[in-house]
Image: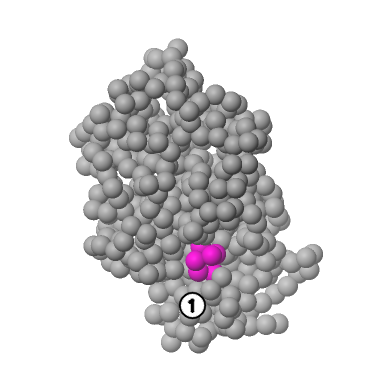
Amino acid sequence: MQTYDFIIVGSGSAGSVVAERLSASGRYSVLVLEAGGTDWRFYVQMPLGYGKTFFDPAVNWNYKAEPDTGLAGNADHWPRGKLLGGSSSINAMVYIRGAREDFDAWAATGNPGWSYDELLPAFKALEDNEAGADQWRGVGGPLHITDCSNAVHPLTKRYLAAAQQAGLPFNPDFNGPTQEGVGVYQITTRNGRRMSAARAFLRPAMKRGNVRVETNALATKILFEGKRAVGVEYEQNGERKIVRAGREVILSGGSINSPQLLQLSGVGPAALLGNLDIPVVHANDNVGANLQDHVGINYTFRGKLPTLNQILRPWWGKLLVGMQYILARSGPLSLSMNNAGGFFRTDPSMARPNMQLYFQAFSTVIPRSGERPILTPDPWPGFSIGLSNCRPSSRGEIMIRSSNPRDYPKITANAYSTNADVDEMLAAVKFVRKIAAMPAMAEIIEEEVLPGPSITSDADLIQDFRKRSGTVYHPVSTCRMGPDASRAVVDQRLRVHGLDGLRVIDASIFPDNITGNTNAASILTGWKGAELVLEDQK
C-alpha cells in the first residue's frame, strides 16, 4: 500500500490549485485522484466549445436535480466537470471574484482570515490580468485573465448603451472597487485557449517528481482510524485500490461530490446514514445541507441587425470562424457566450446589487432535447439578455440515495422557495425589459421572442420564470465553513469538525454564496486552503 503526505480527491478549480501549492516546495508527496479523464480535448480547450461539453458524458457528470415545484416541476440539468480541471474545464469562463461585502460577511460570522482585505493579496497573487496591475488586479500569477473589451460583438456596445440609458453606470472592471454597473466580462483564457485550473496550476505541478495524478480514479470511501482520516479507497479500471495519507486527506470534489463522499464514508446526517446501513464515523446534519445556487433566465429578442447567429449557423460561417480560430486563435470561438453583463439592485434602497446581467449576441430558442446548440444557433438574427439572482434565500440539499458510490446523489434545489426570491426575480425581469425598451436597443429589436409580448401580468411573468429558469451552475455551501460545529462542516482552517487529518477545500465550504460567478472564488479557496494546510504542518 502506497503512502503519500497528501491525498487530494478531485482535480477541479480548487483541487488543482491545492496540488500545485502543496507540491511547490518539493518537501511533500501529493496524490491527486480524479474520477474523470484528460482535458486534452479540442472542445475543452476551445473557449466556445463548451456548448459541446454541456451534455457530453465523457467529460461531464450530467447530474439531474429532483423535479422542483419552484421551477414548475422541471428537473434541472446540472452539468459538472468530470475531467482534469473539473468544472473550470467546461464552464463559461467569466472571471468574477465576488463582492467585498460577501467575504467580509464570511469573516464576520466567525471565520477570521476570510475578509476581503485579507484575501485580496491572494487574488492578486494568483492572477495574470491582461488589463494590467493596479490596486485591485494582479499580474504575473499562474491564472491568465483576458480583457475582451476590443473583441466583443458590435451589438454589445448597444447593450451597454441601453443599460446606461436605463440608469446603470458603466463599470470597466467588476473586480475593481465596486461591482455595480454594466461592462464587458473578463474571462479565463490565454492566447485563445481556455485557461482552466488544470492548465494554470495542475499541469505545471504534474511536471514535479513529488506529484502523481491518477485519472479515472473514483474515490469511494475515506478510510478512518478512530476519528482520524488515514487514507482513501478508490476504483480504477474495475479494480479496488487503497492509498494512505501520512498527513491529510483533502476533499476537493466540489459542492456535489465532497458531501457525497463524506456521507459514503460515514460522515453526515446520522438518520440518513443509519437508513442506508452506513456505519456512522461522525454525525453532522450539515453535510449536504444548506445548498445555495444562483438561478437564471434569458429574455430573447429577434433583431433587425445581424448577430452571431448569421455567422455560427451556416456551413460557410462555421468554416470562416473555424479558420479564424485555428489560424489566429481569435474570433467568436475564442470568447465566452457572455460578452458582457453587469450587476444591479432591484430596489434602490438596497445597499448593493442583488442581480447579475448577461448579454449574448446570439440566441438558441429552438434546441433539441439534450442539446445546447451554441455552435448552431437560431436561423434568424437573435440575441439574449439574461440575468440571475446573486444571494437567493432559498436553500436545498444534496444527499446520497444509497451506499453505492456510483449512484448519483439526490439534488433538491428548492429554487424560488421563498417569497423574497420570487419578488426580486419579478422586479429583475421587468428591468430587463426596461433595458430592451431603451433607444439604443429598441431601435434594433424586431420583437421579443421569449417570453413574448403577451406575458405582461405579474402572475404570468412569475409563471414564465418558474417554467424557464434554471441553475446557472454555481452550487455552494454543502460543507459550509463556520466556528459552530452544530451549524457547519468545516472550521475557518477548513478542517472537518470533529475529525482529524481531513479537510474540505472547494466551493462547498462557502458560508454563503457570492455575488457573481463562483469559479474565481473557488480557485481562491484552493489557494487560501493550501496556505492553511502548509501553515499547520509540524
Residue at screen point 62% across, 77% down: 212
When the figure is inspected, residue 475 is found, relative to residue 468, above or below; the finding is below
Residue at screen point 45% across, 17% down: 447
When the figure is inspected, residue 327 is found, relative to residue 212, above or below; the finding is above
Q: Is residue 20 visible?
A: yes
Residue carrying label 1:
22
Classify mark 1: residues with Cα within 10 Å, few (<14), some (14-19) or many (20+).
Answer: many
Residue at screen point 67% across, 66% down: 215
Q: Is residue 319 magenta?
A: no
When the figure is inspected, residue 315 is found, relative to residue 88, above or below; the finding is above
Q: What element does badge 1 sit on?
A: helix
Quarter placement of the N terminus: bottom right
What residue occupies the far left of the structure in this picture?
349
Q: Is residue 134 left or right of residue 441?
A: left
Q: Is residue 52 left or right of residue 97?
A: right
Question: Could you tell me how many numbered marks the image carries?
Answer: 1
Camera-side residue of 150 and 161: 150
Camera-side residue of 303 and 226: 303
Residue type marked 1: Leu
Report the span colored magenta. Answer: 197-202
The image quadrant of residue 442 is: top left
- Image location (x, y in percent) of residue 301: 46, 24
Prevalent SS, magenta region? helix
Camera-side residue of 314 and 190: 314
